[in-house]
Image (cartoon, rainbow, N blue to C red):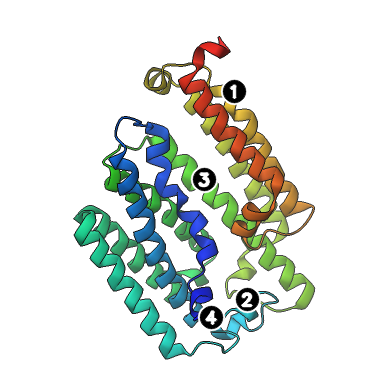
Amino acid sequence: MKDHIALMRPKQYLKNCFVFAPLFFAMPIDHPELLIRSLLAFLVFSITASAVYILNDYGDIETDRLHPKKKFRPLAAGKVSGISALFLSAGLLLTSVAICLAFLNTQVLALILLYLVINVIYTLKLKHISLIDIFIISTGFVIRLFVGSYASGLDLSYSIILMTFLLSLFLAFAKRRDDVLILMETGHKMRKNISGYNLEFIDSAMSMVSSIILVAYIMYTISPEIIAKHHTDKLYLTSVFVILGILRYKQITLINKNSGVPTEILMKDKFIQLSIAFWITSFLLIKYAARWFI
């Protein structure tokens, strides 16, 4: 049972918090039922993501056995059989569909199925094509946003969609950097497409993407639409914590050379945790106590 739970990668559920982004940026405190629907959306996407992780691990058994960390995954280590893993994946997918039909709506179900189809194609073919692979990963984060939006009935701004795509692209590049380092140190290719990346390319891409993220966020906070929506023109102050968070992640990636598992970094690095906590706190304080900052 323990190995089957590990196979579902519950630690990766942290990524699915993007489902709550529409709720956070809209902050409809007078409609608590939207939180319940967002929580259901989070549950549905987490279950679906687990099913996809299992399919991906099933297709990567041989390459994972060569990876210094992934070789300990249940399928690669032989702790869970392939048939058992596939049955678990199918059961998770059926559960996800049932929850959508019973408590959410067909739009969320359609997005869940789209996410599944994209990831099946990714597992079979697209993950072997450099650049396309990380763009597919980033698309998955945007789908998370729309799942939260359709579940809660809250609109998404173009800026949030763009920043989410770029942030996930930044994290994906950092992850590929870790694969390049493993290739340089061991001579083992963790991915067939790794020859399409090198340190110079990834470092320049990360710098470019991180710069665009920061500009996009600042432009978002000072846009007339957002100022009118949140009734304050002081949200730009929160950009300090966004800058700190991104710089810290680049420090971990470029200096510590430890960017293979983004969720582990977010769960263990106190600096990033504090940056996120202060960003959320400052955002809420400025929105609801804007007069303190005038």
What residue is disc 1 on?
237
What residue does disc 3 label? 166
Q: CA distance from mark 4 to mark 2?
A: 14 Å
Circle nearer the N terminus (4, 1): 4
**Is label 4 or label 2 in front?**
4
Disc 4 versus disc 3: nearer the observer: 4
Q: Position of residue 19 (x, y in %)?
A: 40, 49
SS for dot 1: helix
Residue under label 2: 70
Q: Where is mark 4, residue-wise? A: 3
Along the viewing direction, whichever of 78 and 164 lies nearer the viewer: 78
63 with respect to 24 (left or right): right
Q: Amino acid at mark 3?
A: Leu
The residues tagged by marks 2 and 1 sit, at their Cα atoms, a distance apart of 40 Å
The correct choice, above or below, for 167 with respect to 277 in the image is: below
Residue 209 position within the rendered picture, expressed as x and y whole percent measured from the top left:
59, 44
